Amino acid sequence: MAAATNQARIGRIGLYAFLVTTCLFFSIPLLVVISTSFKPLSEVRDFSVFQLPAQMTAAAWGKAWQSACTGTECAGLHIAFWNSVRIVIPSVIISVLVGSLNGYALSHWRVRGADTLMLALILGAFIPYQVIIFPLVKIFSTVGIFGSVACIIAVHVLFGLPVMTLLFRNFYVGIPNELVKAARVDGAGFWRIFLFIILPLSVNMLIVAAILQTTGIWNDYLFGLIFAGHNNTPMTVELMELATTSTGVVEYNVSTAAALLTALPPLLLYFFSGRYFVRGITAGAVKG
Amino acid sequence: MTGVRVIGVSKSHGLLRVLQDIDLAVEPGEFTVLLGPSGCGKTTLLNTIAGLDIPDSGSVFIGGRDVTNVDPSGRGIAMVFQSYALYPTMSVRRNLSFGLRVRSVQRDEVERRVAWASQMLQIGELLDRKPNQLSGGQRQRVAIGRALVQKAGVFLFDEPLSNLDAKLRMETRVEIKRLHQELGATMLYVTHDQIEAMTLATRIAVMHKGRVIQYAPPDELYERPRTMFVAGFVGSLATNMMTTRLSPGDPPMITLGTGRFPLDRYDFTSAPAGDRDVVLSVRPENVSLATSGQAGTVEADTLFTEPMGADTLAWFTLAGQRISARLDPHAARGLTGRVRLAFDLDKVSLFDPASGDRL
Ligand SMILES: Nc1ncnc2c1ncn2[C@@H]1O[C@H](COP(=O)(O)OP(=O)(O)OP(=O)(O)O)[C@@H](O)[C@H]1O
Ligand SMILES: [Mg+2]
């Protein structure tokens, strides 16, 4: 008996030791970044990165936002932040709504060639997008919108649609088709059924999809770099510029503050909508 | 009032022929039940009439108008679905009024109809609840209410009671019958429960493998089934199907074990020629115990009895075949050994063993 409990206790201690180590392993870099961002430049230069700031200051944050140099301009990240917002909001709204519309059409209406379309979508979701960047650049240049907000939004919508459509289709096949039939007998058509019956049932799914898209698009770097054009560069691209623009000393405190600023929006989003996220993911079929 | 005519409707899903050349006429005000085993195409036929499925060939007329290519909303029908299909995000009131608002019915008229239907179905207190706050029976009533407010000429029901427990099913059955009498509307009702069919219908269409086998009033269906399938499918107690020998003459005789029975009043579709094997269908309630020695009786051995309350179902073997009789519980008590059975020969049916058709 005693031996058994002892063994169990040792096992438990081992488990906790392992958990604490992993926790530290993952959180130390984050802690270092956070602590560095609150240090004055002198401390960054003269002390170890593991030391906590002796003098807390938010100066680096202010500089990262307002006046740090990115390339030749020295205005911080605030312009890029608003660029990102201008890109993310329409991209998310359009891709989520169109994805949900596609999913509804594919799951509840007889669409000619629906199976082929599904196959194409699944393939589309897996194609490495580097492959089609060059053709896309060509196409957008020909149309004449290359390097504009519209262009980068179009790119995000295009690349988001396969996954959004699959996500919503799989959610909507769980909604009994009799619901749609009942509405058709009641006289409602394709759009009215979508707006008044399907969309209200999808609130949780819409939130999940919006979170996925917002995070994905906010964190995008490559598309922003290529398609957005100089006046609309998103925050991620500017962050890279900021970190690589050096005038003598490397201001790690400003770089880390800028990195945290860029990472903050998706983080806050998860923080405030985690509840819906779980609810949406676990939401099963709808029973009448 | 509106009648429904289905003319030569066929429909396939891939290689599977779900509906094969269906003809069906429902007179105005009639209560027609589509009865058949699972998968025989009842729902598909109903959906075809509703316009939710498009037939490969044939046409559908409602109220004398060819609606084969008309949308469900334009056919003047209302439908109740098997799974209720209430709109989950809408209150009961919204569920009832959705169709009317879609059709831009005036607001006070909408309210009048919702009040009328909810009073008729006693769902007045439920109007502000959501479907997931209702019991199965209440949902059922709301689903019927949603059809009622349409004031359609034709009501289509797809197994509306199959999700209810036995007691509720009986109550709702009575309710539907009352509604039919009060509204006088034409009703088409799908079920695979033959008690439901017998109690509700003015005429029953028995379906099997995508065809309508027989379309007749319940008593005719019960007493003069056109095929062996109909005889076997209709009736709450399974009918006895026995292989017997038929010999022509005046009257024609059938031989069963040691017994010989004259068929002097049987209405043959064509006069029998020559000795042949036939299938005799005799319902349990038409088998009785006889006092020994009578003519037109036959000896059988008792197997066991199943008391069912009002009567007892007794099982015997006769010439190597099983036969059941629905007996008075007193008469059946303590029944053992060899007995003599008599048949009500006016109520038997004979079938060709090969084709299954009535003789
Ligand atoms: N969309 C479809 N694709 C392929 N086959 C189908 C489809 N819908 C129905 N079927 C087939 O058609 C046949 C008839 O189906 P239907 O739903 O009309 O049967 P039912 O008589 O209503 O049966 P139940 O009593 O079980 O509801 C079945 O064999 C079914 O498998
Ligand atoms: Mg069915």
Image: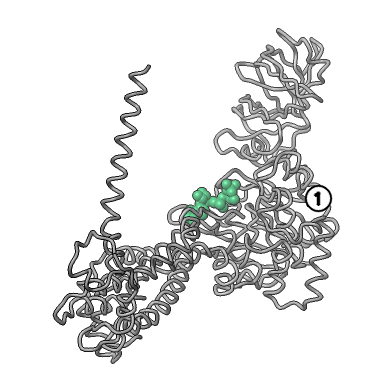
> Does residue A20 lie above or below B294 as drawn?
below
Pinpoint the chain carrying mark 1.
Answer: B
Q: Can residue B196 be seen from the camera position used here? A: yes
User: Would residue B330 be found to the left or right of residue A270 on screen?
Assistant: right
Name the spot of residue A143 as percent of width and height, x first: 29, 90
Query: Which amino acid type is marked by label 1?
Result: Glu
Disc 1, ligand 2: is the CB inside 8 Å? no
Residue under the image location 79 percent in, 44 percent down: B171
* Label 1 environment density (alpha carbons within 10 Å; few <14, some 14–19, many ≥20): some
Q: Which quadrant of the figure contains the C terminus of chain B?
A: top right
Name the spot of residue A219 as percent of width and height, x first: 31, 70
> Does residue A22 lie above or below A175 as drawn?
above
Name the spot of residue B233 as percent of width and height, x first: 65, 38
- Which residue ends up furthest to the front in the rendered image? A54
Q: Can residue B211 be seen from the camera position used here? A: no
Picture quarter containing residue B353?
A: top right
